[in-house]
């Protein structure tokens, strides 16, 4: 069959474009592989990447490296999945005041996205921001204007009128109001939803049902200052079958219900420590301390109880406002140190930072572990993270989707 010249030229152009986009395969050799699944590390491993995917990952003798592969020698180093920060607010204005133009908030979001990549974080879930900046950042990534971490945004926080959240939250009233809010976030292009108390059981039920209709993953702020007494607002979210709870603000009996229903939690331990250390940053903390008897010791206890109940835990920092400026990447590393301090093994903690986050995002088929078919999101660190997390936060290489974005302290993109 004779192929028209026009079609042949188009085919050649497409092949050339694909070649320019990804280039030769990449082989990372000689390092110790921690694949995110929780198994024992593999010494002298090879990770082979082609286009945006992992082709193979395992002992050196089991992976055949193509002759044209570009090689990165990781001998003496450790190769592990990129971390996932499950609780961040990228476009909050620095001083907490709204940004009428939205432009500065967008640039601030890009600044922190790049700071995260420098730290080995390759995916993050933004759990409340302004619609236009988040849309701009996601679209800029899609068309290739920026090369940074994978964003998973909820859009605006959904709460009741006068409820917990910044003034740019979406304030709704009644079950239909919550349904309409979810629909608007879906229409704005977001695939994740976050609700926050105070809300009625009917409002929480409606939000969860509407999110499921649109196949959106839904999480809820976990009570705390927004709780009413004596009932736990968190329990309403749990009864509504949200997929995740943010923060460990709840009675222990709520953990029993979460374990029964398979609801995950993002503990955000370090931000609690920072806020209790300086309660003037957030006056609500003073209320929790003095009126309800909350303390860091209580959060520690809740973490241990959640771990004992085998509740799925991801890692999130909630590095809001000046906390991100002053404390990242150390804030993420310290969050991991809290997990081991409270009973997790280092391997469990790394799994929480990688595979568990992917599961909570609903992207476990593509993210979170280094194995065949997964997206090539990874980092190389110089020290052994199973001996000390001090080795983390300053990787020598960061790859996202097969593209090396950071190498030996320099930005490649």
Image (tube, rainbow, N blue to C red):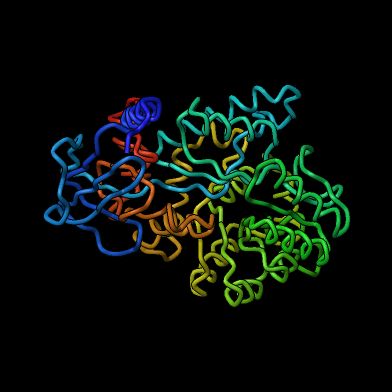
Q: Quadrant of the N terminus?
A: top left
Q: Quadrant of the C terminus?
A: top left
Q: Give the number of marks.
A: 0
Residue placed farthest to the front in the image? 1
Q: Is residue 60 above or below residue 51?
A: below
Relative to residue 133, is residue 369 drawn left or right? left
Q: Nearer the viewer, residue 283 or 107?
A: 107
User: Residue at left 62%, top 63%?
Assistant: 243
**Residue 394 at least partly seen:** yes
**Residue 404 at least partly seen:** no
How far from the left and from the top, in percent, is residue 115?
46, 32
How far from the left and from the top, in percent, is residue 153?
61, 44
User: Residue at left 39%, top 59%?
Assistant: 351
How far from the left and from the top, in percent, is residue 121?
43, 42
User: Residue at left 45%, top 63%?
Assistant: 342
Relative to residue 287, is residue 345 drawn left or right? left
User: Residue at left 86%, top 47%?
Assistant: 162
How far from the left and from the top, in percent, is residue 104?
64, 22
Q: Is residue 198 above or below residue 3?
A: below
| Figure quadrant of residue 66 | top left
Q: Is residue 245 above or below residue 162?
A: below
């Amino acid at each position: 069959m004779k192929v028209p010249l026009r079609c042949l030229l188009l085919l050649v152009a497409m092949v050339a474009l694909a070649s320019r986009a990804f280039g030769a395969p990449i082989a990372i050799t000689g390092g110790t592989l921690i694949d995110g699944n929780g198994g024992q590390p593999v010494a002298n491993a090879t990770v082979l990447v082609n286009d945006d995917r992992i082709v193979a990952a395992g002992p050196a003798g089991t992976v055949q490296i193509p002759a044209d592969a570009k090689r990165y020698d990781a001998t003496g180093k450790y190769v592990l999945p990129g971390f996932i920060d499950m609780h961040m607010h990228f476009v909050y204005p620095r001083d907490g005041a709204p940004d009428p133009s939205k432009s500065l908030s967008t640039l601030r979001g890009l600044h922190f996205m790049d700071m995260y990549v420098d730290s080995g974080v390759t995916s993050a879930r933004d759990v409340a921001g302004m619609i236009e900046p988040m849309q701009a950042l996601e679209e800029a990534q899609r068309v290739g204007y920026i090369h940074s971490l994978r964003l998973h945004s909820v859009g605006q926080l959904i709460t009741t009128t006068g409820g917990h959240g910044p003034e740019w939250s979406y304030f709704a009233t009644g079950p239909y109001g919550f349904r309409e809010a979810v629909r608007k976030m879906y229409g704005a292009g977001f695939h994740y939803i976050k609700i926050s108390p105070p809300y009625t059981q009917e409002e929480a039920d409606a939000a969860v049902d509407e999110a499921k209709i649109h196949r959106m993953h839904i999480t809820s702020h976990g009570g705390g200052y927004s709780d009413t007494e004596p009932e736990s607002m968190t329990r309403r979210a749990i009864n509504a079958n949200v997929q995740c709870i943010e923060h460990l603000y709840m009675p222990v009996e709520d953990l029993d219900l979460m374990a029964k229903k398979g609801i995950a939690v993002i503990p955000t331990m370090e931000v609690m420590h920072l806020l209790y250390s300086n309660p003037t940053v957030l006056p609500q903390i003073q209320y929790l301390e003095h009126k309800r008897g909350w303390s860091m010791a209580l959060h520690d206890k809740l973490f241990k109880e959640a771990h004992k109940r085998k509740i799925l835990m991801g890692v999130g920092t909630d590095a809001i406002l000046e906390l991100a400026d002053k404390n990242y990447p150390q804030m993420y590393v310290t969050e991991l140190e809290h997990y081991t301090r409270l009973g997790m093994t280092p391997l469990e903690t790394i799994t929480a930072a990688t595979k568990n986050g992917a599961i909570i995002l609903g992207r476990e088929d593509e993210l979170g572990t280094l194995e065949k078919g997964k997206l090539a999101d990874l980092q190389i660190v110089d020290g052994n993270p199973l001996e000390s997390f001090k080795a983390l936060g300053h990787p020598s290489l960061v790859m996202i989707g097969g593209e090396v974005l950071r190498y030996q302290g320099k930005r490649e993109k």
